Structure formats: structure tokens, C-alpha cells
Image: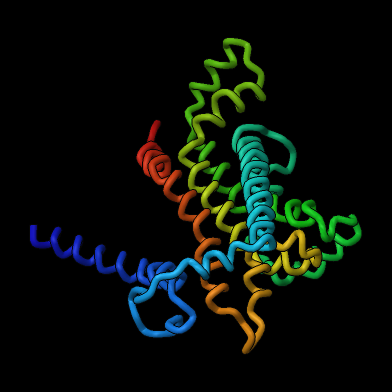
Amino acid sequence: MKRNYLTVAFLVLVAIILLFPIYILFMTSFKSANELFTATLWPHFPTLDNIRAALSSKFLVSIRTSLVVSITVTVVAMLLHAMCGYALARFDFPFKDTLFRIIISTLLIPSMTILVPLFMIAKFLGITNSYAGLILPALFNAYGIFLFRQFYLGFPRELEEAAEVEGCSKARIFFTIALPLSKPIIIPLTIAFFLGNWNNYLWPLVVNKKESLYTVQVYLANMVSGYSTPWNKVIASSMLAAIPVFILFLIAQRYLQEGIKTTGFK
């Protein structure tokens, strides 16, 4: 019993440590310019001026761009990775194992090493400074393919065999049986894909120079300009940019817990 209390106390302490920077970010967003850098845990004179200043048209455009890119990449990549993982787990075709090894080997390649070749390909295809340039290179992720393949290797074949007896095609089996029952792997990957693209900074910075297509991370980075940086506006904008992440987690938390509970079904 005493050990349980110690475990709970330790977890509470860890949660406080992890949430403290987020608390400071939110509280600082409501501080006036005079007390912005004072070491206080809450604003003595709360104000909404920072929030109003942060909600500019350029900031809202960057939020829209990040939402379009993150949602599109998450949805399309999830479907493509599920199809690829299912094919690698269930179908027999020449060089299947070799192809899977090649896909997995891409995890060993640092993204920085392919940044220039990737930009050259995007420029050759004429997709720089466009949504296509922001979205298409982010669709492939070997980690997602690997997780889907491993999930479908343990997927009950009895369900698919029963559907085949009823005359279902392979495509119908995948879309009506395998994919809907893949929630335990779809939910965590959805969160990972969305956060990865929402927080992506380097590739959107390289492939796009149009201000109207700035993602929120590029917009926040461009606000920092040495001694003339409006830190109150930067902090408030960072707080607002973090809100979609918290909303996604709150929405997906219940499904994530359910997915963890059902990962051991046979």
C-alpha cells in the first residue's frame, strides 16, 4: 500500500515537472509588457492585448496552412501506409522481403542528408512554393508502414477467410474489415503524424518562400528578429499555436486508451 502511494506521488511530481513549462507559456501570454520577463507564476495585471496582437491575418493564414498540410498528410499517409502494410503482411509477390528491407533501411538515413536532393526533385517537378511541395514529400514514412505490417501479421485470418467465403474481394476485405479494425494502430499513428507535420519547420522553410504559404512554425521563427523581437506577441502566438495540439490530444485520448486495451485481441 505504501508503495502505491509512493508511485502516485512520483507520477504526480513528474506530471507537474512536465506541465510546468506549458503553464508558464500560458500565464506569460497574459502578462503585460512591463512584467513579461519577471519571475512570477501568474500575471499581476492580466491583459488580452498580447492575444489581440497575435491574432493577425498572417498568423491565421499560417494556422490554416499548417492545418491543411497536417490533416492532408495524416489522412492520405494513413491510408497509403495501411494499404502498403496490409500488402506486405498478406500478399505474396516477388521480392517482397527485399522491398520491405529497403523500406526499413530508409529509417537509418538522416533527413538532413536527403534535404538537398529532395529539394532538387521538388524543384524539377515544379512543386516548390505550393501545397504539393509541402505535402507530397511528407507522405512516405517507413515507420508507419512497419507498424501496420506488424499489426496485420497478427490480425485474425479467420475474419478474412469468412469474408472470402461470402465472395468479398481483397479490396473489400481490406476496406470493410481490416481497416476499420485497425483503430489500435491508427489512433497513435494519427497523433504522431499530425504532431510531426504540425511541428515541422525545416522542410517548409526550404521548399516554400511564399509568405501566404508559411506554416505556423516558419511564421513563429520569422517573428524573432534580434533586439526588435516583440516577445509578448511571440509568446502569445506560440500559446495559440499549441492549442490545436491540445485539442487533438483531448479528442483522441479516450480512443488512444481504448486502442491500448484492445491491442491484445486474438
Q: Is residue 95 left or right of residue 252?
A: right
Q: Is residue 98 left or right of residue 46?
A: right
Query: Which image quadrant: the N terminus?
Result: bottom left
Instruction: Name the image quarter holding residue 121.
Output: bottom right
The picture places residue 55, in percent across and down from the top left corner, at 59, 62
The correct choice, above or below, for 95 with respect to 39 in the image is above
The picture places residue 145, in percent across and down from the top left corner, at 61, 46
Instruction: Name the image quarter holding residue 5.
Output: bottom left
Q: Residue furthest top?
A: 166
The residue sitting at 69% across, 57% down in the picture is 61
Q: How is the image coloured?
A: rainbow
The residue sitting at 73% across, 68% down in the picture is 205
The residue sitting at 51% across, 35% down in the picture is 182
The residue sitting at 68% across, 60% down in the picture is 57
The picture places residue 35, in percent across and down from the top left corner, at 42, 82
156, 22: nearer the viewer: 22
Q: Residue furthest bottom?
A: 227
Q: Is residue 11 visible?
A: yes
Q: Is residue 140 visible?
A: no
Q: Is residue 226 left or right of residue 129?
A: left
75, 248: nearer the viewer: 248
The picture places residue 65, in percent across and down from the top left corner, at 69, 54
Q: Is residue 126 left or right of residue 231?
A: right
Query: Which image quadrant: the C terminus?
Result: top left
